[in-house]
Image: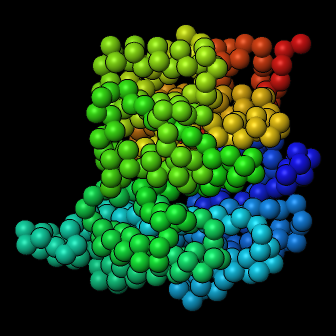
């Protein structure tokens, strides 16, 4: 395809919700590659406990399908079927509602038979969304904790778990437990439908992410059933089931960008310790290597440790000082040789302090500014998917001749400011400040507390921002930046920044 045609081509994107990590980052990938990622209007995506407007999103998708420049669609089936990730965890939309809305994907296929359709959904996590006591909600505190504990028992129950299960059922109450189990059944039926739609050719690439859940719980038979049906329908090349949720939109957008460049990225994976691939994230059901190899495929890549286009360097918890030195030396040598290096630092899974120290080290040494990607927050899958997405977007843009270096600098700056400065330095301060005021539940703050906390967040992050940018890109300055708490909680921050070269 001619470069001019590629510049005009665009990707229509429906995120899983309106958080920055799920909606902002995929759009920023398009800027790096120089290809527009057109996100569904924010007004239609809902906010936290307020579900998105799935029916209005169908109207938007039809408008996108009418545009000749739209050659790919990346759609969250949770948003389309239920109104988003949080809405997918509660009773609300019926199975019939979900099926009706998901038929829109078949209409897209009919209208745009040559467009690429990537879809991503989730296998419902064990815990409902954590909400403070007194909040009107399906399962506020402490009910959601009891549901989480119940869902983490074996299925079927072990004999020693029977009395505990009965006690939890009594605490939860039969109506709430029945509604929770019915929601799980609805979601499983929808996920099975998505496999059928992929087999029929409606969806080109499907990924079902197991949202936060370990190796034991009610999800285990669900995952087993879905894996059996995936195999029975011969979908291993076009569908996958793997740990993760928040990163899946980023991964499929990266796939669409690589596909536009006619490129299957070859990716080497190197760990900071000899047994790093065996490390298990406590809220994922498989070792990190399982999620990493799966994410490479979701991003349209190929695992290739011998002749890679991108080196994915994974720092795992409990990396020794000597191993860190060797790890840094390896990345420095690759960067000096002009190779693309993506760093996924998973050490926060054991120690935020360790992760912070390593971030400071690579910022001070100048290595951070030479990386093609950096990520270090949330689950293993979230971190790795974000790092892979950034590096692939840059590689796709370079191959197309549309690469935007300033957009790439901006993405990396946001990742250091968010994944390192906010989560390692600022967020603990915010939580401690709230706790000192007697506010111990930070999952949904009152309006006054949210306003005061957001102001403190902005002030503290600004102080880190100037230092980090000076280390990453001393030739640039912050022309404009807005910072906030998008869901009135301290779990995440929003950062919208414009960088400009110094005159």
Which residue occupies the extreme left position in the image? 160
Q: Is residue 26 visible?
A: no
Q: Residue at x 50, y 50 (%)?
A: 295
Which residue occupies the extreme right position in the image? 4
Which residue occupies the extreme front position in the image? 306
Residue 102 at x, y percent in the picture: 63, 79
- Identify whether 21 is placed above or below 369: below
Q: How many marks?
A: 0
Residue 216 at x, y percent in the picture: 25, 62
Q: Nearer the viewer, residue 223 or 229?
A: 229
Q: Is residue 259 visible?
A: yes
- Identify whether 152 is placed above or below 425: below
Which residue occupies the extreme top position in the image? 365
Residue 359 at x, y percent in the picture: 50, 22
Q: Nearer the viewer, residue 143 or 4?
A: 4
Residue 452 at x, y percent in the picture: 60, 39
Q: Residue at x 29, y 79 (%)?
A: 173
Q: Residue at x 79, y 35 (%)?
A: 403
The quadrant of the rendering that contains the C terminus is top right
314 with respect to 334 (left or right): left
Q: Quadrant of residue 270?
A: top left
417 with respect to 162 (left or right): right
Q: Quadrant of residue 249?
A: bottom right
Q: Residue at x 61, y 42 (%)?
A: 265
State the scheme by which the image is colored. Answer: rainbow
497 with respect to 48 (left or right): right
């Amino acid at each position: 395809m001619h470069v001019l045609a590629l510049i005009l081509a665009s990707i229509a994107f429906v995120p899983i919700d309106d958080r920055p990590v799920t909606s902002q980052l995929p759009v920023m990938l398009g800027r790096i590659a120089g290809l527009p990622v057109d996100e569904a209007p924010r007004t239609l995506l809902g906010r936290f406990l307020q579900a998105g407007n799935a029916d209005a999103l169908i109207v938007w998708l039809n408008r996108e399908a009418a545009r000749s420049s739209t050659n790919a669609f990346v759609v969250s089936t949770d948003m389309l079927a239920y109104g988003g990730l949080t809405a997918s965890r509660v009773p609300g939309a019926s199975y019939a509602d979900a099926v009706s809305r998901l038929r829109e994907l078949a209409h897209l296929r009919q209208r745009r038979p040559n467009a690429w359709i990537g879809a991503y959904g989730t296998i419902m996590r064990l815990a409902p969304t954590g909400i403070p006591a007194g909040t009107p909600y399906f399962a506020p505190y402490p009910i959601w904790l009891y549901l989480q504990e119940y869902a983490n028992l074996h299925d079927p129950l072990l004999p020693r778990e029977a009395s505990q299960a009965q006690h939890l059922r009594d605490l939860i109450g039969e109506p709430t437990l029945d509604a929770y189990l019915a929601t799980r059944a609805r979601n499983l039926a929808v996920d099975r439908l998505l496999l059928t739609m992929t087999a029929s050719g409606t969806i080109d690439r499907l990924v079902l992410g197991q949202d936060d859940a370990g190796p034991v719980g009610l999800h285990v038979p669900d995952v087993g059933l879905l894996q059996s049906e995936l195999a029975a329908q011969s979908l291993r090349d076009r569908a996958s089931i793997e740990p993760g949720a928040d990163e899946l939109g980023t991964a499929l957008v990266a796939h669409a960008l690589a596909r536009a460049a006619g490129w299957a990225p070859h990716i080497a994976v190197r760990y900071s310790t000899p047994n790093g691939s065996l490390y298990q994230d406590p809220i994922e059901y498989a070792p990190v290597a399982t999620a990493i190899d799966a994410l490479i495929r979701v991003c349209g890549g190929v695992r290739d440790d011998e002749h890679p286009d991108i080196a994915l360097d994974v720092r795992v918890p409990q990396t020794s000082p000597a191993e860190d030195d060797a790890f840094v030396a390896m990345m420095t040598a690759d960067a000096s040789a002009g190779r693309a290096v993506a760093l996924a630092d998973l050490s926060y899974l054991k120690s935020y302090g360790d992760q912070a120290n390593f971030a400071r080290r690579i910022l001070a040494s100048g290595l951070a500014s030479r990386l093609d990607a950096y990520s270090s927050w949330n689950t293993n899958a979230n971190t790795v998917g974000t790092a892979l997405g950034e590096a692939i977007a840059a590689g796709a843009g370079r191959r197309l001749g549309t690469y935007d270096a300033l957009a790439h600098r901006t993405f990396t700056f946001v990742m250091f400011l968010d994944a390192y400065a906010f989560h390692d330095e600022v967020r603990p301060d915010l939580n401690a400040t709230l706790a000192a005021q007697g506010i111990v539940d930070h999952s949904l703050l009152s309006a006054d507390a949210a306003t005061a906390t957001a102001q403190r967040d902005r002030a503290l992050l600004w102080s880190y921002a100037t230092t980090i940018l000076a280390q990453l890109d001393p030739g640039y300055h912050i022309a404009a930046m807005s910072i906030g708490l998008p869901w009135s909680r301290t779990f995440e921050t929003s950062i919208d920044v414009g960088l400009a070269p110094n005159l």
